[in-house]
């Protein structure tokens, strides 16, 4: 029994603090993924929190045939998808920066490099926001969270082939949008 | 290879190759392509750079932990969304594959309020139709005709508005005579005398019960006697006084005078404590069940003067119900439902003329109303005899029958509602085998079966709906299961009563019947007395020794009177027989169960003699203290919670449940028996007065000082 399974068992036994450990374990990772999907730090926080709440409430229904993290991501992406359906953000450059907050740029770099990094992040986020939800989600899960195709397919409840094709199209669209950035990097 | 190059931008193998998600075969093909095609290599480099760019985005972290908020919100939500019966858990987005069962969805939808609306409306409509049935309308029409004939133009509308049914509040408004709408209706009704009469007499027919009940409570202050009197009668009296017209009750009064009732009341030397003075009008036509010199006769002494005075007040039109206007309405509201609750039959004394006997007038009325098979005794109506017809009627049907009877004064010269239970009927019924049944079935058994058949379900439902059971099983306002008895106390008391000859007060818990069973069963008490004396007064027997047992301790009945005020169950009784009391302090809702409970408690303490305790172990002795305890506890809490709104079934029950009505058909003398009675009794009264004067004169010389001439009395 892995750590997650142990914590889940304790939670189901009535030790709610065990679930708190699960929250602490996965909250940042989940948040980092969701914030790129929903495009807003506040919405991302709410979505993550709601995902944990739902996971706690419905923990008894978790059959543990998959990883807890995968199950949690599925809940989180459903919540995020619902949120996106309710309020589709109109992303602009400034808004993207505001939504994602201050960029945590490397403090060791100089001011000029820091400005360049900020500008690149802004462009990437803008390009991500321009993608469709399904493409952005797949791309974020792959590039930001590092999920394998199978996990992505499980989280999004899609066939692996669909994940691969969507991911390739998302990359091609993002490549077109970030062509100048990529050229500049080269 | 050519096709791969041609579709290079669409070739997802490069992206998968970048992610390492290809099979060995696919990977070999992609590597061959990359080795031969520079564009493929360039695309792969761009994808790799893009991926690096995305992965280089700074990772974001939450500034604070979510665990506290998550757990708090989750627990709150779990409490709020605690699983309800029939509510399936929402499918989890993960492995939650359990779907909501179809039946749960159906139940959930069926229980939605909007889906219950139309059935409720349909039921309400059905109730309205049943209440406003044509038979009842016909009866009221007859009443109207008779009312017009008796109370011509000067009589203002008495009832103000016809009642729609026992469940409506129309007659409340009519009784109070205060509502603006009611005034408008009355003004409109005044133009249509028939309708007016209908309303007046319809109210009168009900108010006659109130007349019999509790207006003469010796120990009670005169603040609320109106509750014991028919509210319609009171309201009409008020209007008559204000408008100067002759009220419908006055008309009724005239009728009673004509029939000798009020004359009897005027001549009545002193109503016995057992015969409630308020019932004097109703009971005076009956032979007094209390023989002179009996214990009950002795008991009349303390309250006789007051009662006589009160009767005089009634005669003089003095309205001591002035303060009880609200109480009048309460009494009216409470009248009908209480009637049907009573296990004791409503006794209706009906004098029938020989012509009515010949024409079978009463039977025709019963047949006309289609009341079903009436339970009739085999006793024939003959001169000086009686015949009993027992039927089970709803409150509305009671009104209709009475209206029918009263509409034919030539056949039924006198109809008294709430008369005394005839002693010979009682004696025949209790403990006696049913004629024609050779299996030893007693009248008690038949009667209990009847009661249980009609009301058993009601009581059972009431018990099931009882909110809580007080210690000892006492449920104020509800049935109390008598210890040691296998049936609810109401029945247990009835059954036990007959087995307690001369028990001197069984002191039952709620029904109070056992209390009246202090006698040999000739009388039964239905109401608890608020003032105390009535507790003993109610137990007036037919010349048996129970009175003194109940009377001395009767003041202990006072706490139950408080209970009656707070009793939540059912309102007051309609017809009060001699020996019955209706609590002046009993407001609307002062319930049947409460009254019964109070009565039981009162008699359990005050009326229970040691002999009775021995005779009835486990009945009054245990029931009464527990009841009193519950009563005190309830009285001690000023904000005693009232019962919740009655369920639909209870409302139905109140409006449709039947009660036993015993018609005592008494043959009237030819040519107007009442007039003859009046004349005879007036003569007798004058003779008695002359004798009394003579006795006084004869006694005076004896008290005179010595030396007075002995011939003085002769002069006088």
Image (tube, coloured by chain):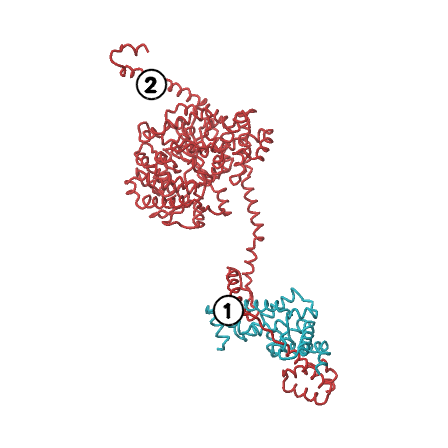
Chain colours: A cyan, B red
- Residue B538 location in percent, x, y? 36, 35
Check if mark 1 and mark 2 are on a common chain: no
Mark 1 closeness class: few <14, some 14–19, many ≥20 residues within 10 Å: some
- The one nearer the camera, A4 or B433, is A4
Between the residue at mark 1 and the residue at mark 2, the CA separation in whole angstroms equals 97 Å
Image height check: is B6 above or below B491? Answer: below
- Work out whether residue B249 can be spotted: yes
Image position of B148 with respect to B390: above or below = above
- Determine the residue positioned at 54% across, 36% down: B173
Q: Is residue B294 left or right of residue B42?
A: left
Q: Quadrant of the N terminus of chain B?
A: bottom right
Rendering coords of residue B69 (x, y %): 53, 66
Residue at the spot x=40%, y=44% of the render?
B636
Relative to the observer, which residue lies in front, B543 or B182?
B182
Per the image, the residue denoted by label 2 is B692
- Residue lying at 49% horizontally and 76% vertically, measured from the top left: A3
Q: Is residue B504 left or right of residue B196?
A: left
* Figure quadrant of residue B514: top left
Estimate how packed mark 2 is, as few (under 14), some (14 to 19) or many (20 or more) residues with alpha carbons within 10 Å: few
Q: Mark 1 or mark 2: which is in front?
A: 1
The location of residue B309, given as percent across then percent down, is 40, 26
- Label 1 secondary element: helix
Q: Is residue B238 left or right of residue B618?
A: right
Residue A60: mark:
1
Q: Position of residue A119 (x, y in %)?
A: 69, 75
Q: Chain of mark 2?
A: B
Subunit of mark 1? A
How many callouts does the rendering have? 2
The label number, if any, that marks residue B168 in the structure image: none
**For residue B609, above or below residue B143:** below
């Amino acid at each position: 029994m892995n750590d997650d399974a142990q914590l889940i068992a304790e939670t189901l036994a009535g030790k709610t603090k065990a679930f708190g450990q699960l929250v602490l374990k996965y909250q940042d990772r989940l948040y980092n993924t969701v914030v790129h999907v929903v495009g807003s730090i506040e919405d991302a926080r709410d979505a993550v929190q709601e995902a944990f709440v739902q996971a706690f409430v419905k923990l008894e229904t978790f059959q543990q045939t998959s990883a807890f993290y995968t199950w949690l991501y599925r809940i989180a992406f459903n919540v995020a998808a619902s949120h996106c359906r309710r309020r589709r953000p109109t992303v602009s450059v400034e808004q993207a920066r505001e939504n994602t907050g201050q960029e945590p740029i490397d403090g060791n770099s100089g001011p000029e490099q820091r400005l360049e990094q900020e500008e690149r992040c802004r462009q990437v986020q803008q390009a991500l926001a321009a993608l469709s939800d399904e493409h952005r989600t797949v791309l974020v899960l792959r590039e930001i969270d590092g999920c394998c195709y199978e996990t992505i397919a499980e989280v999004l409840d899609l066939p692996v082939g669909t994940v691969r094709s969507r991911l390739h199209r998302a990359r091609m669209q993002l490549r077109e949008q970030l062509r100048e950035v990529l050229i500049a990097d080269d | 290879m050519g096709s791969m190059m041609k579709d290079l931008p669409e070739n997802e193998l490069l992206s998968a190759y970048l992610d390492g998600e290809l099979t060995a075969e696919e990977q070999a093909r992609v590597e061959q392509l990359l080795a031969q095609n520079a564009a493929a290599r360039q695309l792969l480099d761009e994808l790799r750079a893009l991926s690096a760019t995305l992965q280089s985005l700074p990772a974001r972290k939450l500034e604070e932990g979510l665990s506290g908020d998550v757990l708090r919100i989750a627990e709150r939500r779990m409490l709020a969304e605690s699983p309800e019966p029939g509510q399936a858990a929402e499918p989890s987005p993960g492995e939650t594959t359990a779907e909501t069962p179809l039946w749960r969805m159906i139940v959930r939808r069926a229980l939605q309020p909007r889906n219950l609306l139309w059935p409720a409306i349909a039921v309400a409509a059905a109730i309205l139709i049943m209440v406003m049935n044509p038979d009842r309308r016909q009866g009221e029409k007859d009443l109207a005709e008779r009312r017009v004939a008796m109370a011509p133009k000067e009589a203002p509308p008495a009832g103000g508005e016809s009642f729609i049914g026992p469940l409506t509040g129309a007659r409340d408004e009519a009784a109070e005579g205060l509502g603006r709408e009611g005034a408008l209706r009355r003004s409109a009704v005044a133009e249509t005398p028939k309708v007016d009469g209908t309303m007046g007499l319809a109210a009168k027919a009900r108010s006659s019960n109130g007349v019999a009940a509790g207006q003469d409570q010796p120990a009670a202050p005169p603040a609320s006697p109106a509750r014991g009197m028919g509210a319609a009668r009171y309201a009409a009296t008020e209007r008559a006084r204000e408008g100067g017209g002759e009220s419908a009750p006055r008309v009724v009064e005239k009728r009673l005078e004509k029939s000798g009732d009020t004359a009897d009341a005027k001549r009545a030397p002193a109503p016995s404590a057992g015969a409630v003075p308020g019932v004097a009008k109703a009971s005076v036509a009956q032979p007094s069940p209390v023989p002179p010199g009996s214990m009950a006769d002795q008991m009349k002494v303390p309250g006789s003067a007051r009662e006589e005075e009160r009767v005089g007040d009634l005669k003089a039109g003095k309205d001591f119900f002035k303060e009880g206007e609200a109480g009048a309405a309460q009494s009216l509201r409470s009248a009908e439902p209480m009637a049907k609750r009573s296990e004791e039959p409503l006794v209706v004394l009906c004098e029938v003329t020989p012509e009515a006997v010949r024409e079978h007038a009463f039977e025709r009325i019963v047949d006309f109303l289609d009341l079903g098979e009436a339970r009739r005794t085999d006793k024939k109506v003959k001169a000086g005899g009686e015949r009993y017809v027992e039927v089970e009627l709803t409150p509305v049907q009671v009104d209709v029958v009475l209206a029918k009877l009263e509409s034919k004064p030539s056949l039924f010269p006198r109809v008294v509602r709430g008369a005394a239970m005839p002693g010979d009927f009682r004696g025949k019924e209790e403990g006696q085998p049913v004629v024609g049944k050779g299996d030893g079935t007693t009248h008690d058994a038949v009667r209990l079966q009847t009661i249980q058949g009609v009301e058993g379900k009601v009581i059972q439902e009431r018990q099931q709906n009882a909110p809580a059971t007080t210690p000892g099983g006492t449920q104020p306002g509800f049935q109390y299961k008598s210890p040691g008895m296998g049936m609810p106390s109401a029945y247990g008391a009835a059954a036990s009563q007959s087995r307690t000859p001369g028990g001197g007060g069984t002191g039952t818990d709620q029904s109070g019947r056992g209390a009246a069973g202090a006698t040999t069963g000739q009388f039964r008490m239905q109401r608890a007395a608020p003032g105390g004396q009535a507790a003993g007064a109610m137990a007036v027997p037919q010349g048996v020794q129970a009175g003194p047992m109940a009377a001395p301790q009767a003041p202990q009945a006072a706490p139950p009177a408080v209970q009656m005020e707070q009793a939540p169950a059912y309102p007051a009784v309609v017809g009060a027989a001699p020996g019955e009391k209706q609590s002046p302090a009993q407001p609307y809702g002062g319930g049947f169960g409460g009254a019964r409970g109070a009565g039981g408690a009162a008699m359990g303490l005050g009326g229970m003699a040691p002999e009775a305790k021995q005779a009835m172990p486990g009945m009054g002795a245990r029931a009464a203290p527990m009841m009193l305890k519950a009563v005190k506890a309830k009285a001690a809490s000023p904000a005693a919670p009232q019962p919740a709104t009655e369920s639909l079934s209870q409302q139905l029950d109140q409006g449709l449940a039947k009660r036993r009505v015993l018609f005592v058909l008494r043959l009237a003398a030819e040519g107007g028996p009442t007039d003859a009675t009046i004349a005879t009794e007036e003569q007798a009264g004058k003779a008695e007065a002359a004798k009394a004067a003579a006795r006084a004169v004869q006694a005076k010389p004896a008290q005179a000082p010595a030396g007075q001439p002995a011939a003085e009395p002769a002069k006088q």
